[in-house]
Image (cartoon, grey):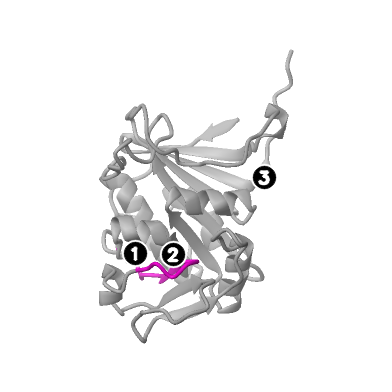
Amino acid sequence: MTTDRAPLPTDDGSWASVLSAARDGGRIAPEWQSLFAPIIGAGAGKPFVIGQLGQSLDGRVATSTGQSRYINGPDCLNHLHRLRALVDVVIVGVGTVIADDPRLTVRLVDGPSPVRVVIDPRGRIPRIARMFSDASTDIVVITQDTGPLDLPSFVKVVRLPGDGKGRIDPKAIREVLFGLGYRRMLVEGGPNTVSAFLEADALDRLHLLVAPVIIGAGPAGVSLAPTDALSDARRPVTTSHRLGDEIVFDCDLRRQQAPISPE
């Protein structure tokens, strides 16, 4: 079952109340309460990890030729930047850095930019990546590579063991970042990275931003190991919010609904 909420604001008139609540513990404006209170109010004794994916109605994150800008419209892009402003770190895989060259800063709304984290098991991140030209916030590269990396001196390198297949355990990433003092974490992309965190049960919440477009073919957003029985499928308690012409599905992955029983 999905609970529908009132449409979200498409302007920043009451966004300041959310920033104030995150910073000082003030009250969130009612229109933002359902969506952002779980992030701001997450317990201090453990990490809180939220993933986000933008996709089409048929679950695609790009066309078959790889074109992905922009499936979601400006309101959903603003939502992404709001999420960045509320977390300590934003996490992406190195494939996203190579393909999209993101800055991972907060530019579209008011708020602080988070620490930027890149998961790069094999040391592929290019030194000319655009984020390296902006040292306004810290950058952490998590790798299993044991050799020297060609990175700017201000980048912090964290080395973790891999699984022999070029992957690093998402739970290990979550714990090492929490040990560095980062509690609220946003796993922004790409879809393989978000799916890996979801598969490993390393996400507390997932925001799926769905645009009213049908692409028909192309890479899927969430891709997990096969489930044989519907009774074994994940059924998170979910709230939907209209955001302009699009829908934000807020999935609480720590709360599951009971499977639907056949009549």
Which residue is depicted at the point 43% across and 54% down? 189
**Which of the image's four quarters has the N terminus?**
top right
Provide the secondary structure element on which disc 2 rests: strand
Which residue is depicted at the point 51% across and 68% down? 25
Q: Is the magenta stretch mostly helix, strand or loop?
A: loop
Three-letter code for the amino acid on which mark 2 is drawn: Val
Q: Residue furthest bottom?
A: 153
Q: Which mark is residue 104?
A: 1
Three-letter code for the amino acid on which mark 3 is drawn: Arg
Cβ–Cβ under 8 Å for marks 2 and 1: yes
Q: Which residues are drawn in magenta?
A: 110-125
Which residue is depicted at the point 56% across and 39% down? 238
List the residue tagged with mark 3.
Answer: 255
Q: Where is residue 103 in the image (x, y as percent from the top left)?
A: 30, 65
Q: Where is residue 32 in the image (x, y as percent from the top left)?
A: 44, 50
Whether 137 is among the magenta residues is no
Q: Residue furthest top?
A: 263
Residue 28 in sight here: no
Position of 239 relative to 155 (above/below): above
List the residue tagged with mark 2.
Answer: 90
